[in-house]
Image: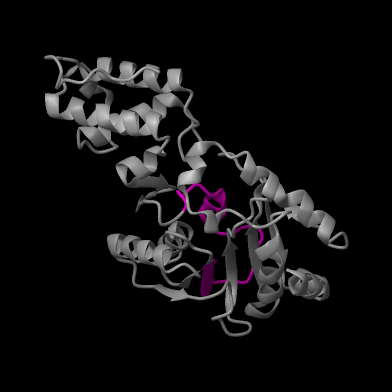
């Protein structure tokens, strides 16, 4: 296993370029898993280096020819050790992540933001929403609040509700809300959509736990640092989805849209509701297993959802 040399053992004078090259090589040699907002060991090395040097993410390549201080290099060495030896995701090490145009405080209280639903928000929910001005957007199983806060940024005139069962996740969401200062967002603890009144939401963004038992057993170690509560969802990954569909049938207004992310459990969802013609979305920036369901779709599958929900 390769690790960075420690400047505490010997005097080391490296440029940022040399430190970046060394960090990337160490990550590649250790075969870390890149799947939490970074596409490559290079991208993770850049993030770790900038964080260690306390430089903004907007820093340009002009920094590469400059020398790192001993303190900066020591911090980078420690970050790299955590990434390699403990397999901590980079976002947890540096305490920050980015999704769309926003930065989020990030730690092990919630999943690292990475949902392809970001693109749905970026496109203003078009072409699936056609009901005029959006009045109420719900982010259910909100975790650290990234999707709901992106929606609040994109739709400043809409009311945005962030819901989660986990108090720790909601505390992180509150910190992210404080970071951005949106005044159109409220946070509520509750079981899925249970706190909401009938026909109260125009848009529901749902990224519930959906990892099935087989996938949970084979997750890379980086994912095991994330809260299991936000990942595991039973044998087929749909333990919570059935209840969510049933609740959404009551909470969504006529003309409203549910955007539901189920990842690799998409086939299990189709098999559970063979009478429903699911619309699966494609994304420019990657991701899969996201479908749209209208108010009328939800009314159609409600009876089946009730049966499944009673079994879980």
Who's the residue at 42% across and 39% down the image? 89
Q: Quadrant of the C terminus?
A: bottom right
Residue 59 visible in the current orientation:
no
Q: Judge from the rendering whether residue 43 lies leftward or rightward of residue 72; answer left or right.
A: right
Who's the residue at 42% across and 62% down the image? 169
Give residue 57's position: percent from left, percent from top.
Answer: 29, 37
Q: Is residue 121 magenta?
A: yes
Q: Judge from the rendering whether residue 21 lies leftward or rightward of residue 139; answer left or right.
A: left
Residue 199 visible in the current orientation:
yes
Give residue 226's position: percent from left, percent from top.
Answer: 47, 49
Majority SS type along the magenta span: loop
Give residue 45's position: percent from left, percent from top.
Answer: 35, 27
Looking at the picture, the colour scheme in use is: one colour
Considering only vertical position in the picture, is 32 above or below 106?
Answer: above
Give residue 26's position: percent from left, percent from top.
Answer: 38, 19
Who's the residue at 51% across and 76% down the image? 190
Considering only vertical position in the picture, is 123 above or below 87?
Answer: below
Q: Quadrant of residue 55?
A: top left
Q: Which residues are magenta?
A: 111-139
Q: Is residue 179 magenta?
A: no
For the view shown, which residue lies furthest in the right direction?
A: 275
């Amino acid at each position: 296993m390769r690790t960075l040399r420690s400047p505490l053992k010997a005097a080391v004078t490296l440029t940022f370029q040399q430190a970046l090259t060394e960090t990337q090589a160490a990550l590649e040699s250790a075969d870390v898993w890149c799947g939490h907002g970074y596409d490559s060991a290079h991208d993770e090395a850049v993030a770790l280096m900038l964080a260690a040097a306390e430089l903004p993410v907007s820093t340009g390549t002009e920094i590469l020819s400059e020398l790192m201080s001993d303190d900066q290099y020591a911090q980078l060495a420690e970050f790299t050790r955590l990434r390699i030896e403990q397999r901590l995701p980079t976002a947890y090490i540096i305490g920050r992540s980015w999704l769309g145009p926003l930065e989020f405080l990030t730690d092990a209280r919630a999943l690292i933001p990475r949902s392809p639903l970001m693109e749905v928000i970026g496109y203003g929910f078009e072409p699936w929403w056609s009901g005029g001005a959006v009045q109420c957007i719900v982010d259910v199983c909100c975790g650290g609040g990234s999707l709901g806060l992106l929606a609040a940024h994109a739709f400043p005139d809409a009311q945005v509700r962030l819901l989660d069962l986990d108090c720790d996740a909601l505390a992180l969401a509150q910190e992210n809300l404080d970071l951005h200062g949106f005044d159109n967002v409220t946070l509520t603890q509750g079981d899925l959509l249970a706190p909401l009144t009938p026909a109260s939401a125009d848009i529901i963004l749902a990224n519930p736990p959906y990892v099935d038992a087989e996938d949970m057993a084979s997750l890379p170690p980086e994912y095991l640092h994330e809260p299991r509560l936000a990942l595991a969802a039973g044998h087929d990954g749909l333990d919570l989805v059935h209840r969510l569909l049933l609740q959404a049938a009551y909470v969504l207004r006529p003309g409203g849209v549910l955007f539901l992310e189920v990842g690799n459990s998409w086939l299990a969802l189709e098999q559970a509701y063979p009478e429903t013609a699911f619309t699966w979305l494609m994304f420019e920036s990657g991701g899969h297993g996201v479908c749209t369901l209208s108010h009328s779709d939800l009314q159609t599958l409600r009876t089946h959802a009730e049966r499944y929900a009673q079994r879980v």
